[in-house]
Image (cartoon, coloured by chain):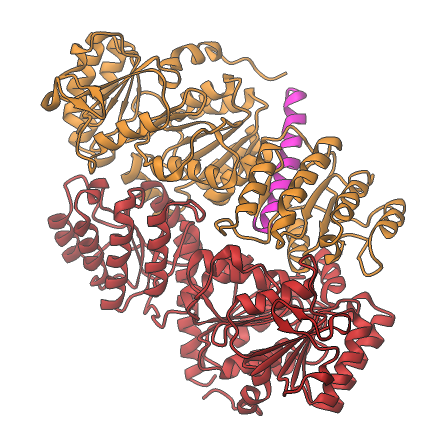
Chain colours: A orange, B red
Amino acid sequence: MARAVIKVKSAIERMRPLFYPKSVAIVGASDNPAKFGYLRLKCLLDFGYRGAVYPVNPRLAGKEVLGLKCYGSVLDIPDDVDLAYMDVNARTALSVLRECGKKGVKAAIVFAGGFSEVGGEGKKLEDEVRAIAKETGMVILGPNCIGVMNLHADLCTFGINVEPLKMRPLEPGKISLIAQSGTLSISFFLLSIVRGFHPSKIVSSGNEAVVTLTDVLEYLIEDPDTKVIAMYIEAVRDGRRFIELCKSTTKPLVALKAGRSEAGKTAARSHTAAMAGSAEVWDAVCKQVGIIQAESFEELYELSTALASPLRPKGNGVAIVSVLGGPAVIASDACERYGLRVPRLAEESIKRLKQILPPMASVTNPVDTTGSVIEDINMFKEALEVVCQDPNIDMIIAMPHIMHPLLLKTMSKAMVDVARRYEKPIVMVWAVPFGVKVQEFEEAIQVLSRGGVPHCYMPECAAKMLSALLAQAAIERKKAKGS
Amino acid sequence: MARAVIKVKSAIERMRPLFYPKSVAIVGASDNPAKFGYLRLKCLLDFGYRGAVYPVNPRLAGKEVLGLKCYGSVLDIPDDVDLAYMDVNARTALSVLRECGKKGVKAAIVFAGGFSEVGGEGKKLEDEVRAIAKETGMVILGPNCIGVMNLHADLCTFGINVEPLKMRPLEPGKISLIAQSGTLSISFFLLSIVRGFHPSKIVSSGNEAVVTLTDVLEYLIEDPDTKVIAMYIEAVRDGRRFIELCKSTTKPLVALKAGRSEAGKTAARSHTAAMAGSAEVWDAVCKQVGIIQAESFEELYELSTALASPLRPKGNGVAIVSVLGGPAVIASDACERYGLRVPRLAEESIKRLKQILPPMASVTNPVDTTGSVIEDINMFKEALEVVCQDPNIDMIIAMPHIMHPLLLKTMSKAMVDVARRYEKPIVMVWAVPFGVKVQEFEEAIQVLSRGGVPHCYMPECAAKMLSALLAQAAIERKKAKGS
């Protein structure tokens, strides 16, 4: 049995004002479109946040900012404030935090840098943030962070320009991210717009004066809407608790650890004051507690989309079903590299494939259906079904022909259908790179993502995704045994 | 001195009808939009090919296809035909090839599969292709290939749906690709549409019955419009000549070798009948002849864009100038991984940066300019110039803030300007993934690509690009010494 962890239940309660605030104050709200205080407010509104929003700026007290009445201080706001976002410099943030304490604000996010990451005086300022949190019981995120996105509450404090992305409405997804980087928090969200697997929650934790990555992890483990927890980590500040929490959950944990090299460690120190430890120790921890490591940020996203599916492979046999010769060869190499097999299909499958596919097709594994699928799309689907029923096969990499726009959506629908009927993980590989502006391609991406079929551009990535599923299956077995 | 290679001069002459045909016949042209024979013709026309085009199909003789008069046979075409494309099955292709011989057609491309890659009877058919080439002197590409793209001649025989991509007019670029995969030929082209560095020529070589990858390599080495040669290789069929040619050129050679694993070798055999050799032997050849190896197909493209610049680093010192904390940490790790250093800047540079940047900025290396560059864009540019003048620095990874659409283009222009004035390679990293639909982002991509500044999404990739430049500098020095 997984070990019990103290306070797990209360994390959801404690952090609620940060993720589900009923009202938000933007302190430092501005009417100048070049300022963060303007962008933050606009982003919050454009994102469709439905709670009360209070701009705060002494210079604009009584005036309107973006159509909302602006207050001179949080103390002037007539109603309760759940969450206050500080778009002011470090020193001002401290005095506003004290006012927030008086006002009974439940949670606060501090954007400003100039705290422990710059050392010296900055460290003292950060100690004050900690003291205020202790005194007032406020949940304080940051400093030096961009805050929280929660698609379940239409909440986004990132200050990004939402309008040109035409990203609303966005259905919330199953993946949540904790990132010790604001840029990467935004980047993860943008990836989700392009690839179609949306996040549930994204938290940028900054210097972690009060709320640490581990605190957020605790929340996300308990959060019923989070099925996969992705992490961009420079340093874990409370290692023992982090380890216990990771051990306690069977939710997939995927992490990209930065600051592995000497150069990276130096960079991390001046970024979020993080003391990145030894790469070897980190690797050992991951192995011990069941964290799957990503090798790049894009991979962190991609592995998360694969792990969001509840399907787990029973073995390491992969079938590659393809119309694409080159990518099938690359995928075969990658499978071997990541510890997967591309076994010969069972004789029964080979016989059936020979009946379905044209004589020129390759019916062992990789299965090459030939380009004739363009003229008969069912052929590819039927081949896929044969392979799904093969006892030698645990997972499938599918590469249907995708150059013909008319077939893109039909093919994606077929893929979702097959993935639902057979309980074997399927990853689809595009030969079209993301960003190619073909309407049908974009629609097909949506069909796959909504249908829960992970997809990627690089055949190597498909193999890596499947190997992560295999690793996660082993982690879950181990945790179920309570080891 | 580099060794002399026989026939180099004649390759340009011999292959001209393949790359610069004055007229093209599409044999198997169809009026059915679902057929390759239709797509091929439409692609050729949409692409803006300016020579004469002759559809050929006995069933449609005398009728019009896509507004062009259709002929019953190549022998019926009243004018000379430089290039004939065969959109017919293997057996028909053979008889048409014989007619082409009679007609005096100079070059032919055979699309059909069903030759040596299926073994048995297919091998005999391929022998016949070879015999016809020998008899007639025709330059035959394929079989089992999609042919040639040459932006210098507005020629594209790939049969892709050009219209929705709105990709015309396309300025030709400096990178040429030889690929033993039709899908990857198209994929490379699509990458170039998204990323902005266009190809010069792309050749899909298929089973290589007559014209081999090495023949195309010989052509591209001589081609004045090709500055970088990218290769997707499953197997080199004429190894000795390949090695001599690689040794003879100082043009950057970048290759992705597939069929490295046992699974991959099997896949390659049924794909293009390629007998992929040992991965170890290949690695040794690359080292010996100066081929830079890519680890994925996307990387093959990305490294090519970096190597297209004539700038070479004099040492391995990298400066990271960034507004993006997380990506800077990742880039630092990646530099170390790829044999680059992120050294402390010279004292003089640190002094100057302190004057330019706000007090919170980090002025050693990585340089973190802080987010204030949003309000003063020149700040970032000036910091970049200081770093370019630093004696400890040979190359730069630049990560300006790119979340604010208004700044995207300005920042990219500044980057191009700095890259031109100082002779140090710069790679720019976006935090925005390709495919995010922001008009200003797309414009900024074009500014950078036209200005010859390589760019990428992943910080790891920037480090890999710079390490490829360093490797190429060493290769060029070695070749100049004639070793």
Q: Looking at this view, name the residue that lies furthest to the front.
A: B63
- Residue at left offset 56%, top offset 89%: B13
- Residue at left offset 63%, top offset 88%: B80
Q: In this view, does A262 lie above or below B478?
A: above
**Magenta stretch mostly in which secondary structure?**
helix
- The image shows residue A265 at horizontal and vertical percentages of 35, 42
Residue B346 at least partly seen: yes
Q: In this view, does B148 lie above or below A179?
A: below
Q: Is residue A482 magenta?
A: yes
- Range shown magenta: A457-483
- The image shows residue A159 at horizontal and vertical percentages of 30, 32
- Residue at left offset 45%, top offset 55%: B194
Of residue A184 and residue B98, the one placed in the foreground of this image is: B98
Q: Is residue B77 magenta?
A: no
Q: Quadrant of residue A431?
A: bottom right
- The image shows residue B62 at horizontal and vertical percentages of 71, 75
Of residue A150 and residue A275, the one placed in the foreground of this image is: A150
Of residue B35 and residue B245, the one placed in the foreground of this image is: B35
Residue A234 at least partly seen: no
- Residue at left offset 59%, top offset 61%: B160
Q: Is residue A415 above or below residue A138?
A: below
Please indicate whether residue A70 sits to the left or right of residue A453 in the image.
Answer: left
Please indicate whether residue B104 sits to the left or right of residue B156 in the image.
Answer: right
Of residue A282 and residue B287, the one placed in the foreground of this image is: B287
User: In the rendered image, which quarter contains the N terminus of chain B?
Assistant: bottom left
Q: Is residue A301 above or below residue B93?
A: above
Task: Tell how many labels.
Answer: 0
- The image shows residue B207 at horizontal and vertical percentages of 71, 72
Please indicate whether residue B428 sits to the left or right of residue A378 in the image.
Answer: left
Q: In which quarter of the image is residue B259?
A: bottom right
